[in-house]
């Protein structure tokens, strides 16, 4: 069963062994998936996927294989469209909701299947159809004492089950990153390690076995120098102003950077729009918590890999004018572009990640400054694909 899925997983680069596949078939035979596609997804992922780094790839393949399969867990797209835009309903008096009218889960599932066969148009309010508002036990944004939520967002936490939500989805490379994606990306970065000069005191087991065999069975120990992590990272966050809509995304990136604690060294600084003579050690950008940019340039070694996160959107004067800083009380004696170029001259391994979609860089607010910064530093969109390209550039930069 599902032989085509096995070959599809292998063809898409997921290393699934025959033993793992037979274990999944045994799980099916034993009824561990309970005739549920969602349960089959969880069981197969647990058995076939060896590392969390492959979760996204597995989800993508699973969706590709089952995308056209009809099953009871799927809610018709037309119905989901009806439920997508709930109408403003009269707020029913909670006293009118009979909390004594409850059903067990099996009865609710049976009722939902019947409604899905009967319903041919949108319904809002009322107590029978799958809709929004009202006191129906099926739909969302209503006031029933219990039921099955279909679509929408949980509000009163009365639903016994949620229908229409699938844990697996299409992972497109232009999707904006979440914290887990950041963590996986930084994990790949910190694995770019080298073997430094030093004593050869780490046993290489594979080569020891090979050389012992070549030596007619007489033990031949083979040693390597220790593999050390020499990755030093500096992250500069644009804080406040036009970056406010991306605060949550930057927070996720910040947490991911801090959890990636295997770097040899990690420095985090903040700036607003562009940095001048100061960088800041907290996102409020208070002068009391600042460090001189020239001190950073003079005292940190060239081998730091610099990641700048910002939308690069500002008035052109902030980049090109002396005294063009957006902060009236902080006069800049040199232009923002001068400081950017000086910084990049010191730290050649430097990339800029922009949360604004790349398709908008040429006409969105700040398009002029985005273009100027792109001419000075390699810029990538803050997506799965963009992060991969930027980190590749960062590692390969000389």
Image: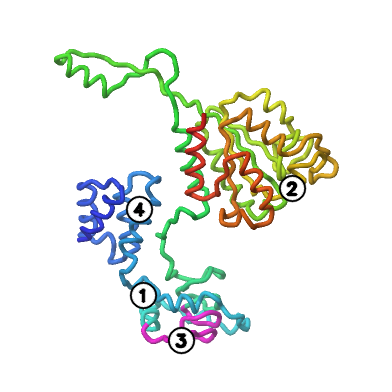
Q: Which residues are magenta?
A: 117-138
Q: What's the residue at 37%, 56% (across, down)?
A: 60
Point out the tag, 2 or 4, that comes first from the N-terminus.
4
Residue 195, x across and y down, in percent: 42, 21
Colour setting = rainbow
**Mark 1: secondary structure:** helix
Q: Are the two marked residues, 2 and 1, in contact with CB atoms closer than 8 angstroms?
A: no
Q: Residues within 10 Å of mark 2 (few under 14, many from 20)?
A: some
- Does residue 30 appear in this view? no
Q: Are the two marked residues, 3 and 1, in contact with CB atoms closer than 8 angstroms?
A: no
Q: Is residue 226 left or right of residue 328?
A: left
Between 230 and 32, the one lying in front of the other is: 230
Residue, disc 4: 58
Number of the label disc, if any, that sits on residue 121:
3
Residue 78, x across and y down, in percent: 44, 78
| Label 4, label 3: how far apart the Cα atoms are | 36 Å
Residue 94, x across and y down, in percent: 60, 80
Q: What's the residue at 41%, 20% (across, down)?
A: 226
Between 371 and 142, the one lying in front of the other is: 371
Point out the tag, 3 or 1, that comes first from the N-terminus.
1
Residue 211, x across and y down, in percent: 22, 17
Q: Is residue 396 left or right of residue 331?
A: left
**Mark 4: secondary structure:** helix
Which callout, 2 or 4, points to the residue nearer the camera?
Answer: 2
Residue, disc 1: 106
Residue, disc 2: 316
């Amino acid at each position: 069963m599902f032989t085509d899925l096995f070959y599809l997983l292998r063809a898409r680069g997921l290393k699934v062994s025959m033993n793992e596949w037979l274990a999944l078939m045994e799980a099916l035979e034993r009824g561990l998936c309970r005739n549920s596609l969602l349960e089959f997804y969880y069981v197969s992922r647990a058995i076939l996927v060896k590392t969390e780094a492959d979760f996204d790839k597995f989800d993508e393949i699973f969706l590709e294989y089952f995308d056209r399969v009809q099953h009871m867990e799927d809610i018709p797209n037309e119905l989901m469209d009806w439920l997508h835009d709930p109408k403003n309903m009269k707020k029913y008096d909670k006293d009118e909701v009979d909390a004594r009218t409850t059903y067990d889960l099996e009865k609710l599932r049976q009722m939902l299947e019947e409604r899905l066969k009967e319903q041919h148009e949108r319904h809002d309010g009322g107590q029978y159809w799958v809709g929004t508002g009202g006191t129906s036990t099926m739909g969302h944004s209503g006031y029933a004492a219990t039921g099955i939520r279909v679509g929408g967002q949980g509000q009163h936490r009365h639903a016994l089950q949620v229908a229409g939500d699938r844990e697996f989805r299409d992972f497109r490379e232009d999707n904006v990153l979440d914290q887990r994606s950041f963590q996986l990306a930084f994990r790949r970065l910190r694995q770019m390690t080298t073997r430094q000069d030093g004593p050869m005191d780490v046993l290489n087991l594979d080569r020891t076995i090979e050389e012992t065999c070549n030596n007619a069975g007489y033990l031949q120990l083979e040693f390597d120098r220790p593999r050390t992590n020499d990755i030093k990272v500096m992250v500069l966050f644009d804080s406040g102003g036009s970056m406010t809509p991306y605060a949550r995304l930057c927070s996720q990136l910040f947490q991911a950077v801090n959890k990636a604690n295997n770097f040899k060294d990690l420095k985090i600084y903040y700036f607003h729009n562009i940095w001048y003579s100061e960088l800041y050690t907290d996102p409020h950008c208070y002068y009391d918590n600042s460090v001189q940019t020239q001190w950073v340039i003079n005292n940190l070694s060239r081998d730091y890999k610099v990641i700048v996160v910002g939308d690069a959107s500002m008035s052109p004067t902030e980049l090109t004018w002396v005294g063009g800083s957006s902060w009236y009380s902080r006069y800049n004696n040199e232009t923002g572009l001068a400081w950017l170029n000086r910084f990049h001259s010191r730290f050649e391994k430097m990339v800029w990640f922009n949360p604004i979609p790349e398709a908008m860089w040429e006409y969105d607010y700040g398009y002029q400054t985005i273009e100027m910064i792109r001419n000075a530093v390699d810029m990538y969109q803050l997506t799965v694909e963009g992060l991969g390209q930027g980190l590749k550039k960062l590692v390969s930069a000389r």
